C-alpha cells in the first residue's frame, strides 16, 4: 500500500487503522488539525503522503473540510479520506472539498481496507507532477530569472520588480514568483499590500528548502495571480541566510515557474551575488544623477570582473526629469552602454507605492505606466494573445496610504 498519513486525537482509531494497513502509518496524534498543507508537511518532517486520513469527528468537521479543500486545490496527488459518523450531514461539503471517501469511526477491517485501497489507487492514477499552480507552464527547466538591482538605494528597484511581477502574472496567472532578496529591509509585501504568512527565512529553514511542492505552500498568492516570497520580518534574520540556501531556493523556483523576479537591496551583497549567479536577465537601475551613474559604472565593471557580462542586461534610467543637468546620452556615454528604457519621475509612482497597488495592476493612465509596459515587453516578450481564463481581475480601487500597516501581523 502507498504512504498513508493519519491525523487524529484517538489512539484507538490509530490502532485499528494500523492493524489494517501493511505499511506503518505516518501519524499525527493531536487534537489540533494543521491549518494548511505546509503545516502538516512540517509536522511530518517534509514527507508528503499519498493518502491523508483526517479524523473529522465533531467539533473538527469544518476544519477538516477546509483542510481537505486546500489539499484538493494545491496537492491533488494527495487523496483525502475523512473519518466521521456524520457522512450524510457532511457528504455534499465533502464532495465539494474533493474528499475521496468518508469512513465511519467504527468501520470494520474489510471496509477500512477497501476504502484505503481505493484511495491509494486514486492517488496513483493522478498524473505525477500535476501542478495546479502553473498547469500552463511549459518546460519547467526554462524558467526565466530576472534580477532587479542597483548600486544605490531609492532608485526604484522595488517599484520595477513589483510591476514586472504583477505584469507577468496578469498575463499568465501562476506563471510568476517574486522573491524579495532585500533580506534586511525588503518591502515587496508593502508595495503589493500583501500580508504573507511565510517569509524567505521560513522557506530556507524548513522542509520547503528541500521540496519544491512544499516550497510552493510557503508562497503567498497576490490578487494578480503573482506568487510572492517576502523578506524576513526582522533584519537580524538576514545573518542566518546563506548564499547557498538562496541559490538552492532560486533554482527550485526556476524549475517550477516560468518567471522568477527578484528584488534586491542596494549594492552587491551576498544574496544579490547569489541571484546574479542564477539570473538570465539583469535589470540594472540608475537614477539620473552623477553619484548614481558613477556607482553604476563601478557595478558594471564588477559584473564584468565576475564574468557576468553574458547575462542579458537591461539598463534602466528611472526618475528621469528634464532640467536636472544630465541627459540619457550623458548616461550612455558615461557607462559605455545603451539605455534600454527611461522611466519618467511621476506622482503616480509614489502614490502606487503608498497604496500598495503597482501601476501595472491599477492601469492608471500615465507616461510612467506606459514605459513600465514597454519595459515588461522588453524583459519578457509575451505571445500576442491572452486566453480568456487568464484575463486579469478588474483593478482594485485606490485606497488611502497605509502608513501604519507593517509586517507585524505575520505569524
Ligand atoms: N518613476 C518614478 N516616479 C516617481 N516615484 C518613483 C518612481 N520610481 C520609484 N519611485 C518612488 O521612489 C521611492 C523609492 O522607490 P523604490 O522603493 O522602488 O526604490 P528601491 O531602489 O527599491 O529602494 P531601496 O534601495 O531602499 O530598496 C518609492 O517611494 C517609489 O514609489
Ligand atoms: Mg527596494
Image (spheres, grey):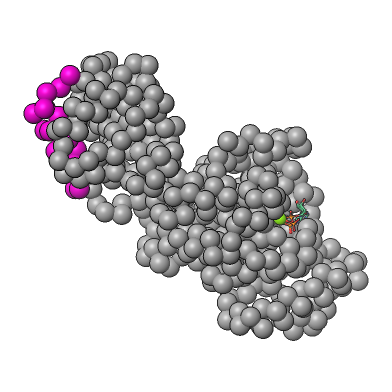
Q: Nearer the viewer, residue 202 or 27?
A: 27
117 magenta-colored: yes
Q: Residue at x 78, y 65 (%)?
A: 152
Q: Nearer the viewer, residue 294 or 183?
A: 183
Judged left or right of residue 217, residue 97 is left
Q: Quadrant of the N terminus?
A: top left
Q: Quadrant of ligand 1?
A: bottom right
At 61% across and 79% down in the image, what residue appears? Answer: 308
Looking at the image, residue 300 sits to the left or right of residue 206; the answer is: right
Up-down: is 314 above or below 393?
Answer: below
Q: Residue 261's quadrant in the figure? A: bottom right
180 horizontally vs 172: left or right = right
Q: Residue furthest left?
A: 110
Question: Which span of residues is magenta-colored?
Answer: 106-125
> What residue is shown at x 37% (from left), y 27% (from top)?
30
Q: Position of residue 231 (x, y in %)?
A: 63, 50
Q: State the predominant SS element of the stretch in magenta.
A: helix
Q: Is residue 178 magenta?
A: no
For the point 11% across and 27% down, the residue is 109
> Relative to 98, does residue 379 appear above or below in the rendering?
below
Amino acid at each position: 500500500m502507498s504512504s498513508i498519513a493519519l491525523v487524529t486525537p484517538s489512539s484507538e482509531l490509530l490502532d485499528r487503522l494500523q492493524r489494517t494497513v501493511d505499511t506503518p502509518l505516518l501519524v499525527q496524534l493531536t487534537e489540533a488539525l494543521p491549518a494548511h498543507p505546509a503545516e502538516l508537511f512540517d509536522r511530518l518532517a517534509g514527507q508528503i503522503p499519498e493518502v491523508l486520513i483526517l479524523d473529522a469527528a465533531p467539533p473538527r468537521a469544518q476544519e477538516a473540510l477546509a483542510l481537505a479543500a486546500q489539499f484538493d486545490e494545491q496537492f491533488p496527488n494527495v487523496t483525502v479520506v475523512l473519518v466521521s459518523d456524520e457522512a450524510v450531514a457532511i457528504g455534499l461539503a465533502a464532495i465539494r472539498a474533493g474528499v475521496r471517501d468518508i469512513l465511519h469511526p467504527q468501520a470494520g477491517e474489510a471496509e477500512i481496507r477497501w476504502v484505503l485501497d481505493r484511495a491509494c489507487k486514486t492517488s496513483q492514477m493522478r498524473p505525477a507532477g500535476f501542478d495546479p499552480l502553473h498547469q500552463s507552464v511549459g518546460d519547467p527547466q526554462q524558467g526565466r530569472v530576472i534580477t532587479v538591482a542597483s548600486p544605490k538605494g531609492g532608485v526604484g528597484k522595488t517599484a520595477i520588480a513589483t510591476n514586472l511581477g504583477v505584469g507577468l502574472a496578469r498575463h499568465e496567472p501562476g506563471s510568476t514568483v517574486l522573491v524579495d532578496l532585500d533580506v534586511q529591509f525588503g518591502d515587496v509585501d508593502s508595495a503589493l499590500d500583501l500580508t504573507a504568512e511565510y517569509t524567505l527565512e521560513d522557506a530556507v529553514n524548513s522542509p520547503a528548502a528541500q521540496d519544491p511542492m512544499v516550497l510552493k505552500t510557503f508562497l503567498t498568492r497576490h490578487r494578480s495571480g503573482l506568487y510572492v516570497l517576502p523578506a524576513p520580518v526582522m533584519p537580524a534574520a538576514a545573518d542566518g541566510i546563506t548564499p547557498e540556501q538562496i541559490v538552492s531556493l532560486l533554482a527550485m523556483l526556476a524549475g517550477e515557474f516560468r518567471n522568477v523576479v527578484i528584488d534586491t537591496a542596494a549594492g552587491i551583497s551576498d544574496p544579490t551575488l547569489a541571484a546574479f549567479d542564477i539570473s538570465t536577465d539583469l535589470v540594472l537601475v540608475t537614477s539620473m544623477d552623477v553619484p548614481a551613474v558613477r556607482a553604476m559604472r563601478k557595478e558594471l565593471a564588477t559584473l564584468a570582473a565576475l564574468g557576468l557580462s553574458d547575462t542579458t542586461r537591461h539598463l534602466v534610467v528611472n526618475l528621469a526629469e528634464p532640467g536636472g543637468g544630465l541627459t540619457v546620452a550623458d548616461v550612455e556615454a558615461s557607462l559605455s552602454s545603451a539605455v534600454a528604457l527611461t522611466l519618467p519621475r511621476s506622482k503616480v509612482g509614489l502614490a502606487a507605492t503608498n497604496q500598495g497597488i503597482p501601476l501595472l495592476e491599477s492601469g492608471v493612465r500615465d507616461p510612467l505606466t506606459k514605459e513600465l509596459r514597454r519595459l515588461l515587453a522588453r524583459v519578457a516578450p509575451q505571445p500576442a494573445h491572452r486566453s480568456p481564463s487568464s484575463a486579469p481581475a478588474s483593478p482594485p480601487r485606490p485606497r488611502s496610504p497605509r502608513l501604519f500597516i507593517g509586517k507585524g501581523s505575520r505569524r
